[in-house]
Image (cartoon, rainbow, N blue to C red):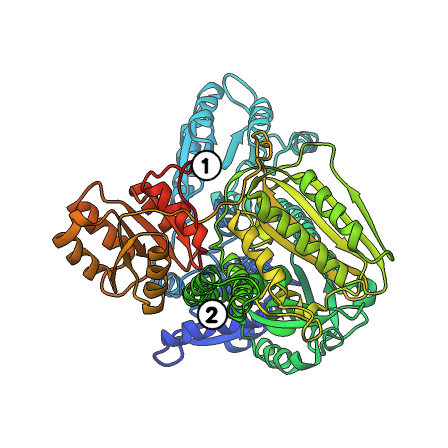
Amino acid sequence: MTTGERPTAVVVNDDLSQLLLTSKLLEKDGLHVRPCRGAEEALAVMCEQGPPDVIVTDLYMPGVDGWRFCRLLRSPEYTAFNRIPILVVSWTFSGADAEQIAANLGANAFLSAPYEPSELRASVQALLEGRRPQLSMRTLIVEDSPMQSKILSRAFAAHGYTVFTASTGEEARRLFRDHSPQIAILDYHLPDITADRLLEEFKQAAVRMVAIMITANPSPELALQFMRMGADGHVRKPFDPEHLIDLCEKAWRERSLLAVEDLLEERTRQLRERERQYAQLFENANDVIYTHDLSGRFTAFNRMAEQITGYTRSEALTMHVAQVIAPEYLGLHHEITAQNVRGEISRDVCELEIVTRGGHRVPLEVSSGPIYRNGEVVGVQGIARDVSEQKRLEAQLRQAQKMEAIGTLAGGVAHDFNNLLTPILGYSRLLKLRGQPGEDVYQAAQVIEGAGERCAQLANRLLGFARGGKHQEMPVDLHTAAREVVDLLSRTIDKRITITQRLCVEQAVALGDPSQIQQVILNLAVNARDAMPHGGNLHFETDVVTLDNDYCRRNLGATVGDYVMLSVTDTGMGIPQEIQGRVFEPFFTTKEPGKGSGMGLAMVYGIVKNHGGTIRVYSEEGSGTSFKVYWPLATGVVPAPVSVEPTQPILGHGRILVVDDEEVVRTSSAELLRHMGYEVVTASDGQEAVDYYRQFGRQIDLIIIDMVMPRLSGADCFRALKAFEPNVKAILTTGFSLNEVAQQLLDEGMVGFLQKPYLINELSEVIAKALHHQDEGEDVV
C-alpha cells in the first residue's frame, strides 16, 4: 500500500542490526518502511495496516522462518498478500539451491548477503516497477488424447510454465531425458505402456520431481497404488485444468519445503563442522584467545591463555579480567573495553602487561572487538600474543647498537692514546740506551717505559673490545688452551676453589689466534675466581655444537654454523638481572675501587666478536654465572709451537721519510731512526709527502706513513706515491690494529706494518726486513 507518494516496504529480520541497516537503506531511497522482528509480527502488521508494496524478508529466523513465511504469503489463507512481490535476503544461505527453493515457495527475487547497498536498492526498485522474474517450471504432460493434451498445455502455459507434451511412453521417456522436467502429468492409460511404469522410472531418476496421475478409473485401490509408487497426487477425469494447476503448485511447494528441510539439515551439519573447526582453532592457537562479558568476567579461555597466565580454564571463568592485568595498565584496558562496548573494533594493537599466577609479568600485544547478540553488544572478544621474545630481541638489538657505539668510541680513544704513547715509549727507550743502570735518568726512564707499556696494554684492550684487534687465524686446540689455564690457576688460586673440567671426546679445534683465545679463557677464569671470595667450584666445559636458525633468531649477532663451545662456570654470587646487559661494557665493574679496571670482559667480548664468534652470559643472583663462548670450528691441524728468540734493535743506513700529522710522533720516530743510523726527513701530512717525493724521491729509501692524517690519508698517500713510483717501499703505521683497511694496503704493496706505540727493536726489525737487510752479521745497539 502506497503512503501518499511513497511506496511502503515491510522489512522482516530477527537481527536488530541487520533490520536497522536494511530499513535505513530503503528509507534513503524514499520508501516508507515498517520494520518487523519476525514473520508473526509482519503478518499482524500487514493485516492491520494493509498490504505493502514490497516485502523484504530474511530466511533464518526463530518461529516461522522465511521459507514458511513465503509459503503463507502465497497461500489461500492470505489471498490479500498473494501478489505482493517478495525479496528474500539471506545472511545464512546462498547458492542456486537456496535461490530456487525460495522462488518455488513464492519469492520473486533472492539476494545473498553480504551485499552492496546498491544491489539491495536495485532489487527492490525492480520489484516495485513490476519487473519480477517469473517462475517458469518445466512441465511434461503425457496424454494420448490430442484434445485433452492441448487444453492442459494452454492452461499451464498461461500460468508461465514451460510445457512439453507426449502421447506415448516412448516419447515421454525421450522428453524426460532431454529436458529434466520438474513436474510430470501422467495419463494412466497410454497406447504403449501404463503410466505407473513411467512413474517408477521417473521417480528413480528425479526424486524431487512432482508427479500427478490422471485417470478415468474411480478405483480407490488404484489411487492408493499411485501414492505408494511416489505420486504426489491424482486427479480423476473429467477435471478443471485450474484445479490440476493448483494441485501441482501445492505439491511443488510441499516438495520445496522438504528441500528446505534438507538444506537446513545440510546447513546445520556444516555449521556443526565449522563450529568444531573453530573450537579446534580456538583451543590449539598459539595466541591467547579469550572472551569476557560486559562486567569483565571471563567467558572463554583457551589453552595458550592457561599456559601463559598459569590459571586453569575453570579458575579463569570465575575471575575478572582486571585480576590478571598489571595495575598500571588497567586504565588502558578500561578505555579499550569502553570502545568495544560502543561497538568499535580496536584497529590498533595495544600493548600491556599481565601478572601471572606465579607473580611474573608477561608483555602482550592485544587486539579486541565487540561480541554481538541480536544486534546488541554482549561482550568482548580478544586475541593476545606473548611478545616476551620480541622484547628480548629488541633489548639485544639496543645493547648491540650500544656496544657498537661504545666500540667506535673506544677505538678512537685507543688510537689517540697509542699516538701519544709512541713518543713516550720511544724517548724512554732512548734515555735508557744513552744512560747506565743505576743512574737517576736511567731509573726514571725505566719507570716511564713501564708505565707506558701498561698504558699500551690498556689501549690494546680497548682496541680488542672495538673488534679491531690484530689476530692470526690458525687451528687452535681448545683443550690444550683450557688445560694450560687450569695448570696456571691450580698453582695460584684459592685452595677453597675446586677446579673441574669436562672436555668433549671430539677434537675441539677452533679457528683463531692462540694467544688471544688463551687470553679470553684466562680472563673468564679470573673473573669467575673473583666471584667466589669464599670458595666454590670453577668448571670448564667444551663441546662441538651447531648453531641453527632458531638459536640465531633468538640470539642477535650469532650466525648459523659449526662451533667449538667453551663454557666457564662458577658457583659464586651471580650477576643481578638488571646489569647483565652491561657486563661487556668497557670500564664497567662491580668490584671495589682499585680491584678491577672493567676492561677484562670488554676485551673478551671484542676478541670473540673479532674472531667471528659469539658469547652469552647466563646467571642468577646467588646461584653463580656461566659464560659460553662459541668459536668457529676449524678443520686443519694444530701447528706445533715455534720458539722465537727475542730481537735487538738493528743498525742500518739510508734515508727514511716519516709521514705523520702528530709532531711528537714525527720527532720521537726521527730520534729513534737516527739512533739506528738512518737519515730522516719528515712530512706533516700525506700531500706534503707526495710533493716531497716527486721532487726528491730518488734520495728516499723507505717511507713510514701514518694511516689517519688530514688533507691526504695514509692510504691515498701510498696510492699516489705508487702511481708515481711503482716500486716505492712504504711501511704503514697506525694507532689502530691491523684491520681490513691495513691488510688491503699490505696486499697492494706496502712492505710492513707497525702498530703504535712501537718499541725500538720492533721498528728496527720491520725496517730491516723492508730494506732487505740480513739479520746475521748486522751491528746491534
Decide which of 715, 232 is in the foreground and name it: 715
Tell me the amino acid under the disc marked 2: Thr
Q: Is residue 522 above or below residue 596?
A: above
Quick check: can you spot residue 645?
Answer: yes
**Residue 513 location, quadrant:** top right
How far from the left and from the top, in percent, is residue 621? 77, 66
Name the residue carrying label 2.
22
Q: Where is residue 59 in the image (x, y as percent from the top left)?
A: 56, 58
Residue occupying image coordinates x 61% and y 70%: 588
Camera sees residue 274? no
Q: Position of residue 745 (x, y in %)?
A: 32, 47
Badge 2 density bin: few <14, some 14–19, many ≥20, Cα 10 Å? many
> Which residue is labeled 1 in the image?
139
Dot 1 amino acid type: Thr
Query: Label 2's element?
Result: helix
Tell me what residue is drawn at x 48 percent, y 72 percent: 21
